[in-house]
Image: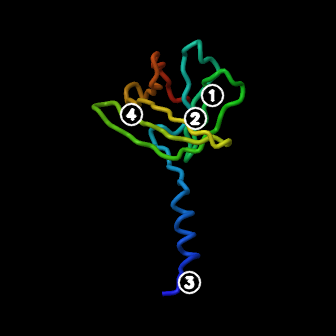
């Protein structure tokens, strides 16, 4: 068997195995989410296609991240999503949100305060 024939195919398989495709956002998360919490005035979370835009920190410019993987776990009326993403600099991030269908849809970031976010109309 001639190894040179198969070398380009082997290289292509190795390269493609190292690439991670983005994952689409579930329909219920799609859109822009805001909160009435004073600490997050003028801040938002935005989920679209394969991206999440985060504007909840101290920075003035929102951070756009490519969603690499989403795990979900449903327990009763609440679905927990663990979202793995990567920013433009290649930094990886993990965000955990809890989604509930209550009141037309509610979102809570998994952190000590669990601030309530509502989808903007």
Q: Nearer the viewer, mark 1 or mark 3?
A: 3
Whichever of callouts 2 and 4 sits on the residue coming sooner in the sequence is: 2
Q: Nearer the viewer, residue 114 or 104?
A: 114
Q: Nearer the viewer, mark 3 or mark 4?
A: 3
Q: Decide: marks 1, 3 in contact (CB < 8 A)?
A: no
Q: Decide: marks 1, 2 in contact (CB < 8 A)?
A: yes
Q: Nearer the viewer, residue 66 or 1?
A: 1
Q: Nearer the viewer, mark 2 or mark 3?
A: 3
Q: 101 above or below 114?
A: below
Q: Which mark is residue 80?
A: 4
The residue to which callout 1 is attached is: 55
Q: Nearer the viewer, residue 13 or 117?
A: 13
Q: Secondary structure at mark 4?
A: strand
Q: 2 above or below 114?
A: below
Residue lying at the far right of the rendered structure: 60
Whichever of callouts 1 and 3 sits on the residue coming sooner in the sequence is: 3
| Cα–Cα gap, marks 2 and 4 | 17 Å
Q: Secondary structure at mark 2?
A: strand
| Cα–Cα gap, marks 1 and 3 | 50 Å
Whichever of callouts 4 and 1 sits on the residue coming sooner in the sequence is: 1
The residue to which callout 3 is attached is: 5
Q: Secondary structure at mark 1?
A: strand
| Rendering colour mode | rainbow
| Cα–Cα gap, marks 3 and 4 | 47 Å
| Cα–Cα gap, marks 4 and 1 | 21 Å
Q: 103 above or below 87?
A: above
The residue to which callout 2 is attached is: 46
Q: Decide: marks 2, 3 in contact (CB < 8 A)?
A: no
The picture quadrant where one finds residue 106 is top left
Q: Is residue 52 left or right of residue 62?
A: left
- Measuring from the top left, give residue 79's x and y in whole percent: 36, 34
């Amino acid at each position: 068997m001639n190894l040179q024939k198969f070398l380009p195919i082997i290289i292509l398989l190795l390269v493609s195995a190292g690439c991670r495709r983005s994952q689409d956002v579930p329909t219920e998360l799609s859109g822009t989410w805001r909160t009435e919490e004073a600490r997050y005035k003028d801040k938002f979370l935005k989920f679209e296609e394969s991206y999440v835009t985060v504007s909840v920190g101290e920075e003035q410019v929102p951070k756009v991240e490519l969603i690499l993987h989403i795990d979900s776990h449903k327990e009763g009326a609440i679905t927990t999503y663990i979202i793995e993403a990567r920013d433009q600099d290649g930094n990886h991030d993990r965000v955990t949100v809890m989604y509930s269908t209550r009141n037309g849809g509610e979102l809570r970031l998994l952190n000590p305060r669990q601030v309530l976010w509502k989808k903007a109309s």
